[in-house]
Amino acid sequence: MIHADLSGKTVLVTGAASGIGFATAELFAKNGATVAINDLPGNPRLQQAVEQLQTQGLQVIAAPGDAGSAADARAMVEKAIEDLGGLNYLVNNAGTPGTNKPIPPNDMASQDEAFWQKLLSVNLLGPWRCTEAAVPALKERAGAIVNNASIAGIFGNGSSSTYAATKAALINMTKEHARAFGPDIRVNAIAPGVVESDWECRFDRTEQMLASIPMKRSGVPADYAEAIFFLCAGGAYISGHTLVVDGGLTAGPSANHTA
Ligand SMILES: NC(=O)c1ccc[n+]([C@@H]2O[C@H](COP(=O)([O-])OP(=O)(O)OC[C@H]3O[C@@H](n4cnc5c(N)ncnc54)[C@H](O)[C@@H]3O)[C@@H](O)[C@H]2O)c1
């Protein structure tokens, strides 16, 4: 695990009551940063997450708000920045598959107008809203943004075509925002592969599937948090980049084949 002295730095992580977001909040806080933990206002795990980290003596505050709501997202970011006294890093991690089982690409009925609107609003407009609200504060501190995309945004084949499209757009927006906000703010993304988390969509992960990953295991939230941490605390000349973090899953056919 990499380390940096982030004393005096502040970070807002969206969707941080569980999974990758929580691991990211924990990693930043353990390295001295003060962290605003965002999640849905009605999610009891938000307060639990804050208390769990505060009990360890870490500096974290709650920042409830729905990234999928225009009014809520901007108000949440503005309040978090006020409470934190400024902002060094924004991690746009909140996302939703909108389904508890994968939807085949040809199942158009399940991917209706309401489904598209929901996924676009949380996965794409959410990061856009939070970014827009955070940019003035981030500029003051020459900060950084990391968006949490997915390998589905590069290769497709995630929980649904709709989800893949929103993540592809997020990767593209990452590049556009790097051009828009440089040199003051660096903007990057990560593209996770297989994640062990409480993600709403459950995939059938066979031993054979996991064995096809060069690292021979699924990724744990800390694996992804470390990549986000690097792109914020390090990577001074990296902007507009999407870092694939998938244990080699999309690197191509295994070198161990016998054919
Ligand atoms: N789990 C996977 O297989 C996988 C793969 C690739 C990318 N990702 C991405 O990683 C990110 C985190 O996922 P995770 O695996 O840690 O899942 P998770 O379910 O453990 O965490 C997601 C968190 O986001 C919160 N959230 C959802 N909608 C929100 C909203 N509108 N506003 C605020 N918070 C909201 C949830 O309540 C939850 O706490 C997501 O953006 C997801 O798209 C996940």
Image (cartoon, rainbow, N blue to C red):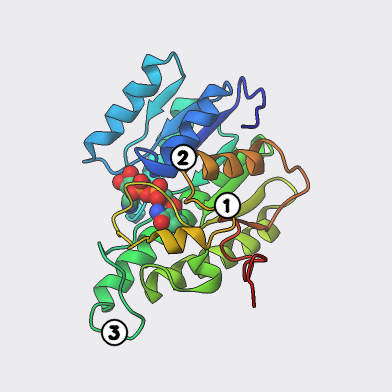
Label 1 beta carbon within 8 A of ligand 1: no
Q: Give me the disc on residue 108.
A: 3
Q: Is residue 107 left or right of residue 35?
A: left
Counting residues from the start of the chain, the first of labels 1 and 3 encountered is 3
- Vertical arrangement, residue 59 with respect to residue 66, above or below: above
Q: Which residue is mark 2?
A: 13
Instruction: Tell me: 38 left or right of 240.
Output: left
Q: Residue 206, how many percent across, how many down?
A: 37, 61
**As drawn, 32 above or below 212:** above
Q: Label 2 amino acid?
A: Val
Q: Residue at x 62, y 20 (%)?
A: 7
Left or right: 175 as drawn, with respect to 154 = right
Front position in the image: 88 or 51: 51
Which residue lies under the disc numbered 1? 215
Q: CA distance from mark 2 to mark 1?
A: 27 Å
Residue 73 seen in this snapshot: no
Residue type at numbered disc 3: Met
Quarter the C terminus occupies: bottom right
Q: Earlier in the sequence, mark 2 or mark 3?
A: 2
**Residue 17: percent from left, percent from top:** 34, 37
Residue at left 30%, top 59%?
202
Work out whether mark 2 precedes mark 1 in sequence or the reverse, and give the earlier one.
2
User: Alpha-carbon distance for marks 1 and 3?
Assistant: 35 Å
Residue type marked 1: Met
Percent position of residue 228, x then y: 58, 43
C-alpha gap between disc 2 and disc 3: 33 Å
Label 2 neighbourhood size at 10 Å, few (<14), some (14-19), many (20+)?
A: many
Mark 3: C-beta under 8 Å from nearest atom of ligand 1: no
Under tag 2, what secondary structure?
strand
